[in-house]
Every structure is written in C-alpha cells, then in structure tokens.
Amino acid sequence: MAGSAELAIDKAFTAQIFNNRTDVLGALAQPGAELYGIQHSHGGRIVVFGGGIPVRAEGRTTGAIGVCGGTVAEDIAISEAGSAASLVIFWRARRRRNRVGRSFPTPWLAPPLWARQGDSERARPGADLYSSR
C-alpha cells in the first residue's frame, strides 16, 4: 500500500526531527496539551500516533525507524524490534572496527532488492568488494 509506505516515512521523519517516539508525541498533541496542533506543522508530515522511534547510539540520535501497515500496537512493537536490531548491528560493526583498527561499511538492515529476487552472488553489484580474501 503506497499510503502505508508514505506514512511510515513520515513517522520516521517525525521521530527524527523531534528526537522522540511518535506515540509519546501523540500524548503531548492532544487537545489541551502542550503541543496541541503540532501535527499540522512541517507541511502536514508530522505523525502523532505510534510507530516512529528514534534510533540512538552512544547518547546520540543516529536515525529513526517508521513502521506502518498493522495496528498501532503492532507498528510500535515492530519499530521497537527494528530499533533494537539496529543497535546490535551498530555495536557489532564498532567492535569489529576496534578489533581490526579500521572502519568497515555498515551492514545492511534489509537485504537489497537483488538478494530478495534470488539473483546469484556474482550478479550482485560490487560483489568483489565483499568477497573473502
């Protein structure tokens, strides 16, 4: 659903710019609350219900995850799992970098399109960059 994809992007956008979860922001955007009407700012891109979570590493916000397509509770659960998984990937990459003494590319969170379509490893763009030496 195209509408779900756009809404997921806007949830991630909201979580990133406000450095807060969208469900927490939703509580603050209720009538009579401090941020009532905030959802009308930024050209209507602000989402004030669950599914957007900022990703933090080492005390800094490094990105955000937005999920849409299920119930609000399901979207929150999936975005929390994605946030936790991204931290595991971050710390593994950091540990590997510290052990070897140089930086490595950040691993993909989701396999690229060519991998999902079942193409061979040889057909992957840049396959020689990641081959074992």
Image: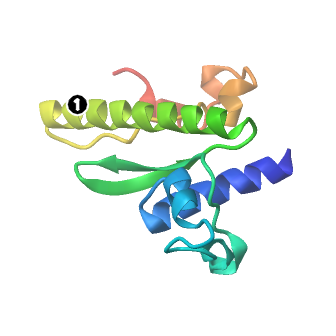
> Which quarter of the rendered picture does the N terminus lie within?
top right
Residue at image point 72% right, 36% down:
71
| Of 36 and 78, the residue lying toward us | 36
- Compared with 55, 18 (above or below) is below
Instruction: Tell me residue 49's x, y (percent).
Output: 63, 53
Instruction: Tell me residue 116's x, y (percent).
Output: 70, 25
Residue at image point 65% right, 32% down:
74
Residue at image point 44% right, 58% down:
20
Way the structure is coloured: rainbow
- Residue found at the far front of this picture: 32
Q: Taking 54 as reference, is 119 left or right?
A: right
- Residue found at the far right of this picture: 1
| Of 71 and 127, the residue lying toward us | 71
| Of 47 and 117, the residue lying toward us | 47
| Of 122 and 58, the residue lying toward us | 58
How many residues crowd around disc 1 within 10 Å: few (fewer than 14), some, or many (20 or more)? some
- The three-letter code of the residue at mark 1 reads Arg
Element assignment for label 1: helix
Instruction: Tell me residue 105's x, y (percent).
Output: 37, 42
Q: Taking 96 as reference, is 3 left or right?
A: right
Determine which quarter of the picture holds residue 102. Answer: top left
Determine which quarter of the picture holds residue 89. Answer: top left
Instruction: Tell me residue 3's x, y (percent).
Output: 83, 53
Instruction: Give the tally of numbered discs.
Output: 1
Q: Taking 68 as reference, is 63 left or right?
A: left
Q: Which residue is mark 1?
A: 96
> Which quarter of the rendered picture does the C terminus lie within?
top left
- Compared with 116, 83 (above or below) is below
